Amino acid sequence: MKKYILPLLFLLSISNIHAQKKDAYIIYNSKGKKVSYTQMLKSMAKADIALFGEQHDCAIAHWLQLETMKDLYSKRKLILGAEMIEADNQSQLDFYLSGKINQKAFDTLARLWPNYKTDYAPLVNFAKDSHLVFVATNIPRRYANQVMKRGFQTLDSLTPLQKSWMAPLPMAYDSTLPGYVKIVEMMGGHGGSNMPKAQATKDATMAYFTLKNYVPGNLFVHYNGAFHSDNFEGILWYLKRDKPYLKYMTISTVTQKDIYKLEKKNIGKADFIICVDEDMTSSY
């Protein structure tokens, strides 16, 4: 009986430690091994392009985006880009970054997400104060919506100016990518084959403007919903298709009830997975 007592006490002590620590998040590598923030930062610093995948309402992810930006600023020349600002608002963003318009004017002239003030303004303002390039990488939502309703062919009738706000046509598309297949499955067949095509217009456009603005020797950090880069697909598929020789790294954000062991479904989602307690207060 004694031989079972020590292992049992050990397991109870480990459980007790976890209960007492109450970590808000833990970072894992792609194999599900716990790593430190410093290890993740070092990996980011070695990349040419880093895709920081977030859950849009995750305050921890937004905070880590800002912290990594600050820490990387002292190590690398940075270029920043984000899904959350659409390409046809690049001029408004540039005016704000250069000081030609103030925050109130930027809020009025650009289509900003409802959670911009709390979640993305800190990133843009850091770029402004540090004189960094910040790229609006996403296709205007109205054109992605057109594709969702009528397919890729609807983009052919756009004007040259409108086409300049997206990846060049015709956009490459692989309907067999697991992420796009999953979209169809999640919709239960509703929306047909156009739903993943609309997603692809976003992925292709974000990759296009990332590569268009990438400067050799710099680190381009791109902020996007995790679904756009999870499992090394989406944006990354387009990046590697055009520039396979660059060094890429990805980050994903997931939530779990128990953050002390990465669930099987989350292993391998990215080079680094930020696992956040599901009870963590959301930003909206």
Image (cartoon, rainbow, N blue to C red):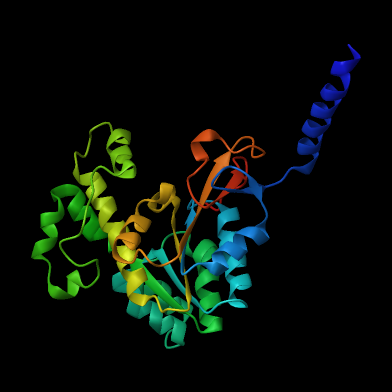
As drawn, is 41 to the left or to the right of 119? right
What residue appears at the point 33 percent right and 80 percent down from the top-left corner?
91
Q: Residue 173: in sight, yes or no?
A: yes
* Image location of residue 173, percent across then percent down: 22, 52
- Residue 134 sits above or below residue 267 on the image: below
In this view, the residue in front, 249 or 3, is 3
- Residue 22 sits above or below residue 116 on the image: above
Q: How many marks?
A: 0
Q: Residue 138: in sight, yes or no?
A: no
* Image location of residue 258, percent across then percent down: 64, 35
In this view, the residue in front, 147 or 252, is 252
What residue appears at the point 35 percent right and 68 percent down from the top-left corner?
137
As drawn, is 262 to the left or to the right of 207? right
- Residue 126 sits above or below residue 252 on the image: below
| Image quarter in which the N terminus is found | top right
What residue appears at the point 30 percent right and 33 percent down from the top-left corner?
185
In this view, the residue in front, 105 or 55, is 55
What residue appears at the point 34 percent right and 43 percent down from the top-left corner?
179
As drawn, is 225 to the left or to the right of 241? right
* Image location of residue 131, percent across then percent down: 51, 84
* Image location of residue 31, percent across then percent down: 56, 43
Please identify the residue farthest to the top as the structure is shown: 1
Please identify the residue farthest to the front as the structure is shown: 245
